[in-house]
Image (cartoon, grey):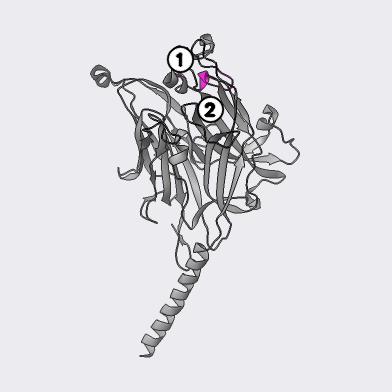
């Protein structure tokens, strides 16, 4: 009888602790703030790719829950993808020395330390924490409680430096252009680029739709100059070691052809070659037999730590039909597919990728292991050619699981 009384007493205490934790977690204030990027100007057929340094961003030791962005005009109205194609935006963290001038020059870019994600395609390519394109308006990236991306921890900032943020924005104005799809796929024959400076087999991509490049506009078309902004919204909670679990962000690329390297001490590292973009040739029966069809792109992925998948999403362009991340044993870790617009209204632009499906596994249900060799598969519609497409996959991984009284290590 005494034992049952003690067990009941213990159960009540444990339940009380659990409820107190739930109350504090559920009532932890999620803060929201919306900012505008610096203004940028577009004319019909023009291209803007800007790096906005020293971005306005929440201060302090916080856990980011989400980051959302879209293009708006001077009246704060959202802009249609039919007019301004949002090729991509990315949010990158960096450390800047206190003595460095705060400007937007190349000198500044050469004097900072990129504090990228945990993936292999960085610091020079895919170093971002958040990144999307036309799918921005209909793709969730909110991290459920108790997870968050830890930033603003002074212990992680090198001595004499400050933590800051860069927003990279790439927008193509397709008003009045001769070939809308060709322009937004950065086909070189439509842009005012010097073909002699390109590789002979380079048909389209970043090298042809860089900042200030111009795509062909129909003869006689006159469109007004437009001043635009990126409106971005950050959601976060104040950091609390007891009630927030930090996560790692990994960004993988279907073009990555990495190889393992062993140093003099026997430590194994990875040398990555992430091209970020690639072309898709239409797949006839002959090309399929010859192995030339590139509508299915594969790359190997090695996980650097043990952990549990919290969130996952792919990034693809028009023509994409989905991407999947597999574990070493062939199990599906996460699959993400494009959502195509079917109308004329903003957010549902016909034929454009207006969203991507996401993965939110139940806590602890999708585990990855350190050293596990997975596979990323990106698929595009093989019916027609596409240039400058992407097959990128982002995942968020936690090395701890929530527990009523403590955090369980993996």
Magenta residues, start to end: 202-214
- Residue 264 visible, this angle: no
Q: Position of residue 284 (x, y in %)?
A: 26, 19
Specify the label residue 171 is tagged with.
Answer: 2
Q: Which mark is residue 262?
A: none
Percent x, y of residue 140: 45, 45
The quarter of the picture where residue 10 lies is bottom left
Answer whether labels 1 and 2 touch (C-beta < 8 Å). Answer: no
- Of 271 and 152, nearer the camera is 152
Q: Quadrant of the N terminus?
A: bottom left
Label 2's element? Answer: strand
Drawn side of residue 183 relative to residue 111, left or right: left
Kindly identify the residue that appears in the image at 47 percent across and 46 percent down. Answer: 141
Q: Is residue 179 magenta?
A: no
SS category of the residue bearing label 1? loop
| Structural distance between the alpha carbons of marks 1 and 2 | 17 Å
Q: Residue furthest right?
A: 99
Q: In terms of image quadrants, where is residue 353? A: top left
Rendered image quadrant of residue 341: top left
Residue occupying the point 53% across, 44% down: 67
The residue identified by callout 1 is 178
Q: Tell me if mark 1 has few (under 14), some (14-19) or many (20+) residues whose alpha carbon lies within 10 angstroms of its own.
A: some
Residue 259 lies, with reference to residue 285, above or below; the image says below
Q: Magenta region, mostly helix, strand or loop?
A: loop
In percent of width and height, residue 218 lies at 48, 13
């Amino acid at each position: 009888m005494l034992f049952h009384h003690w067990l009941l007493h213990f159960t009540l205490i444990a339940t009380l602790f659990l409820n107190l934790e739930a109350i504090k977690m559920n009532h932890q204030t999620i803060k929201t703030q919306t900012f505008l990027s610096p203004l940028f100007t577009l004319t019909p057929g023009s291209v803007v790719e800007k790096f906005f340094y020293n971005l306005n961003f929440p201060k302090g030791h916080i856990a980011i829950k989400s980051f959302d962005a879209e293009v708006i005009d001077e009246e704060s109205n959202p802009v249609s993808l039919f007019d301004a194609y949002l090729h991509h935006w990315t949010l990158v963290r960096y450390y800047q020395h206190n003595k460095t001038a705060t400007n937007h020059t190349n000198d500044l870019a050469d004097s900072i330390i990129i504090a990228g994600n945990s993936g292999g395609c960085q610091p020079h390519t895919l170093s971002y924490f958040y990144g999307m394109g036309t799918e921005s308006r209909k793709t969730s990236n909110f991290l459920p409680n108790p997870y968050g991306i830890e930033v603003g921890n002074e212990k992680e900032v090198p001595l004499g430096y400050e933590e800051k943020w860069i927003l990279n924005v790439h927008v193509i104005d397709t008003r009045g252009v001769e070939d809308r799809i060709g322009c937004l796929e950065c086909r070189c024959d439509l842009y005012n680029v010097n073909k002699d400076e390109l590789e002979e087999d380079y048909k389209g991509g970043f090298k042809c739709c860089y900042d200030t490049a111009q795509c062909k506009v129909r003869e006689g078309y006159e469109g007004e100059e437009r001043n635009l902004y990126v409106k971005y919204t950050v959601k976060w909670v104040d950091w609390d070691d007891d009630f927030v679990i930090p996560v790692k962000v990994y960004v993988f690329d279907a073009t990555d052809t990495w190889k393992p390297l062993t140093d003099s001490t026997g430590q194994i590292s990875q040398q990555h070659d992430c091209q970020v973009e690639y072309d898709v040739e239409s797949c006839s029966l002959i090309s399929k037999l010859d192995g030339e069809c590139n509508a299915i792109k594969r790359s190997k992925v090695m996980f650097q730590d043990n952990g549990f998948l919290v969130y996952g999403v792919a990034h693809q362009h028009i023509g994409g039909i989905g991407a999947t991340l597999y574990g070493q044993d062939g199990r599906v870790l996460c699959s993400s597919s494009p959502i195509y617009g079917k109308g004329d209204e903003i957010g549902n632009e016909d034929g454009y990728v207006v969203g991507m499906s996401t993965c939110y596994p139940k806590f602890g249900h999708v585990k990855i292991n350190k050293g596990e060799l997975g596979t990323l598969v990106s698929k595009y519609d093989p019916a027609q050619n596409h240039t400058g497409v992407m097959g990128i996959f982002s995942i968020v991984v936690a090395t701890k699981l929530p527990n009523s009284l403590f955090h369980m290590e993996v």
